[in-house]
Image (tube, helix red, strand yellow):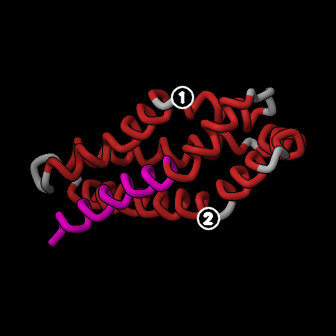
Amino acid sequence: MEFIGKFTYLTNTILCAVLIGYLTSYVITLGSYYTYMLRNGRVKELQASYAPFRTDSNTKALYRICFALQVVFAAVSLLLNHSTHPLPAQVYALAILPIFLTIHVVTGFGKVEEKMASGKELMEPEIDLYTKLNLPLHLVYAALYLIGATWLVAALF
């Protein structure tokens, strides 16, 4: 059981690091591209190509699986390691996605992002919200995972 505990803790840490890279890469590439397209009145052009790709490639499901895996490993790690590794770091790692999703919902960004990605018509205030929040929020989400990964690693020393 000790090996499984160490494995889940390490995997949770690695998954946090992977999500940092994913979110940072999103900001640098796709997120910047989406924001550019929306700022330049090219939302229909973007949606015409991205929405079918997203549906045909199961991108939405794959995206969700990546984030869900980290939560599953964080939960199992917490169950197995609550008395052997610092509790606050483990609880925080488990809380990252709920914090992320709360921000996504409370700001209204999640709803607008889904409309954009699925090809639904966006009104001007929604485009403004998207272009204002897309990159900053994804940087915040990357920072949440950076804090988690750093805290989990620091707890090992």
Q: Is residue 6 left or right of residue 82?
A: right
Q: Residue furthest left?
A: 83
**Residue lying at 37% horizontally and 48% vertically, measured from the top left:** 73
Q: Where's residue 37, x and y in %?
A: 78, 51
Residue 108, numbered label: 1
SS under mark 1: loop
Q: Is residue 143 left or right of residue 64?
A: left
User: Magenta stretch: residue 140 in it?
Assistant: yes
Q: Is residue 109 above or below residue 139?
A: above
Q: Residue furthest bottom?
A: 157
SS under mark 2: helix
Quarter assignment of residue 145: bottom left
- First of labels 1, 2 by sequence position: 2
* Region of the chain picked out in magenta, as a range: 137-157
**Residue lying at 56% horizontally and 52% vertically, measured from the top left:** 135
Q: Amino acid at mark 1?
A: Gly
Q: Is residue 28 left or right of residue 107?
A: right
- The residue labelled by disc 2 is 28
